[in-house]
Image (cartoon, rainbow, N blue to C red):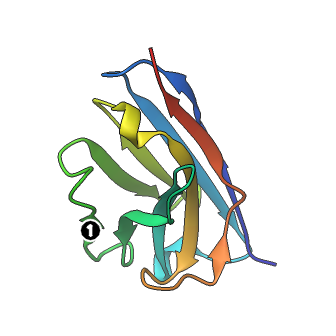
Amino acid sequence: QVQLVESGGGLVQPGGSLRLSCAASGFTLDYYAIGWFRQAPGKQREGVSCSTSSTGSTIYADSVKGRFTMSRDNAKNTVYLQMNSLKPEDTAIYYCAADNCEAPDYWGQGTQVTVSS
């Protein structure tokens, strides 16, 4: 059974940092695309970043380029999203999802990120 479990969200001041984690089980991350998505109140869900595979490329939304970095730890079957220079507009529920970048079939439950002073 495929499971994705996010953690690491919270409240942070503008300019601060957070690192989100997504632990996968039921499949091996090496062979699948996995990405981060977010949904802010009253807005549509949007893609934040996606890694096509452990040896492939990682793409980022323009709004987070230079501030967010996605990484994988294949030994732990876990992916991370390092978020720096956070802005109030980054406030959203963040989800990790697999198995492709366009229309993932598997989703985690989400973790809340709130950027506020």
Q: Nearer the viewer, residue 52 or 11?
A: 11
Look at 66% across and 77% down and name the residue there: 106
Q: Position of residue 13 (x, y in %)?
A: 42, 18
In percent of width and height, residue 71 lies at: 38, 54
Residue farthest to the right? 1
* Side of 73 where 6 appears, left or right: right
| Residue 16 horizontal/vertical position (percent) | 36, 22
Callout 1 crowding tier (Cα within 10 Å): few <14, some 14–19, many ≥20:
some
Quarter of the rendering occupied by the C terminus: top left
- Residue extending furthest front? 42
Quadrant of the rendered structure where residue 7 is? Answer: top right
Instruction: Residue 48: give x, y in percent of width and height.
Output: 38, 60
Count the marks.
1
**Front position in the image: 80 or 48:** 48
Quadrant containing the N terminus in the rendered view: bottom right
Tag 1 secondary structure: strand
Front residue (pair 27, 38): 38
Residue at (27, 50) in percent of width and height: 64
Q: Which residue corresponds to mark 1?
A: 59
**Residue depicted at 52% across the width and 50% down the height:** 40
Residue drawn 30% across the image and 45% down it: 68
Q: Would you identify the image quadrant in which residue 90 lies?
A: top left
| 39 versus 59 height, above or below | above
Which of 4/44 is in front? 44
Compared to 7, does 104 lie above or below? below
Looking at the picture, which amino acid does disc 1 mark? Ile
